[in-house]
Amino acid sequence: YFVKDTRDGIDQIVATIQRTTGGMATPVLIVDDMESSRAALASLLRSQNCRIFEASSGTEALDILAANDSIELVITDHLMSDMEGHELTQRIRARYPSDRMRVIGISASSDPFLSAAFLKAGASDFVYRPFIPEEVKYRIESNIDTLRLIKHLRYLAERDPLTGLYNRRAFFERAGTLFDNLRDAQREGSVAILDIDHFKRVNDTHGHDAGDQVIQMVADVLSERSAADGTLTARFGGEEFVILFAGRTSEEVYVRCEAIREAIAEKAVAFDGTSINVTVSLGAAILQPGEGMDNNLNAADQMLYMAKSGGRNRLVY
Ligand code: GH3
Ligand code: MG
Ligand code: MG
Ligand code: MG
């Protein structure tokens, strides 16, 4: 959900998300041992911009879910040869929380308690057969809307409106998991902190809007240059950014940080008939064996301080 040009802030981000999430087909898995039942549900979903997966048993459903990370809605029958629908629901719930996966149960059972059993197992909704197609259609739609709303709110909570990068909170949440994985796997990692040089002067000379555009340019360079597996980039504070490199050797990190520094130094921001150039300083530190995230960040911060006192426009690693 990276939104590139978000100078207008939250409103524009909201509009962009509505466009993007609204335009994307929702992947839905239909689980039923009867082909005709699956087909009937599939035709109900046809008007709703869904990409449909089908499974004829609980086991097959779990396999399809494991192989297709994008699925976020499951509609399941109850009586199937290998597993009952509420058991499937329970197994799905053990792996995916309800803000990530919606589950709707459907059954022709005459047991009035089945609905409760499904909901207890973690289903988001339940419908008895025979059902009124319109009702099922709108229940499905409501669950898809809920997913969209959650994505939307998650975006607003995790992203910085000026740059579209992860914000500080999202960085710490995601970095924490990455650091733990690196430590457990005894893999290499580094963190780099980047700070714009004499940024106050940009604001003082050209105004706050110009400053904002410079921040935007730096963020663009960062997302272009560090968009790779195992890299987490965030706007850490005002004109300060952080990049976490997971599984990268110190040489690779050095080369990438230098490339970022040079790219920013070479890029001019056109503003109000003038051209603004800035440089950045970077401090980077290798994750030491057994070290925690806070120590690693402190080490990078000390390197940044050295880069600043050493004359700026440089990387200290
Ligand atoms: P140094 O080279 O030592 O980093 O000097 P500096 O001027 O960059 O450092 P300082 O921390 O003194 O100034 C950072 C300035 O960044 C202060 C603040 O007004 C400005 N700033 C922070 N966030 C934003 C923002 O979102 N937009 C704009 N335009 N300015 C911001
Ligand atoms: Mg059945
Ligand atoms: Mg600063
Ligand atoms: Mg600065």
Image (cartoon, rainbow, N blue to C red):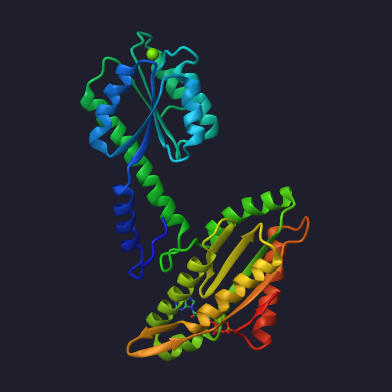
Residue 67 x/y as whole percent = 50, 35
Left or right, residue 76 beside residue 170: left
| Residue at figure coordinates x 45%, y 55% from the top left | 157
The residue sitting at the right extreme is: 289
Instruction: Give the image quarter of residue 260.
Output: bottom right
Number of numbered discs on residues: 0
Mark yes or no: residue 213 visible: yes
Instruction: Give the image quarter of residue 193.
Output: bottom right
From this view, report whether residue 175 is shown above or below residue 4.
above
Left or right, residue 255 beside residue 3: right
Residue 293 x/y as whole percent = 68, 59
From this view, report whether residue 205 is shown above or below residue 267.
below
Mark yes or no: residue 193 visible: no
> Depth check: 55 or 283 in front?
55
Quadrant of the snapshot with the N terminus: bottom left
Instruction: Give the image quarter of residue 188.
Output: bottom right
| Residue at figure coordinates x 42%, y 37% from the top left | 71
The residue sitting at the top extreme is: 110
From this view, report whether residue 274 is shown above or below residue 317.
below
> Depth check: 309 or 36 in front?
36
| Residue at figure coordinates x 57%, y 75% from the top left | 259
| Residue at figure coordinates x 36%, y 10% from the top left | 109
Quadrant of the snapshot with the C terminus: bottom right
Residue 284 x/y as whole percent = 67, 71
Residue 205 x/y as whole percent = 43, 91
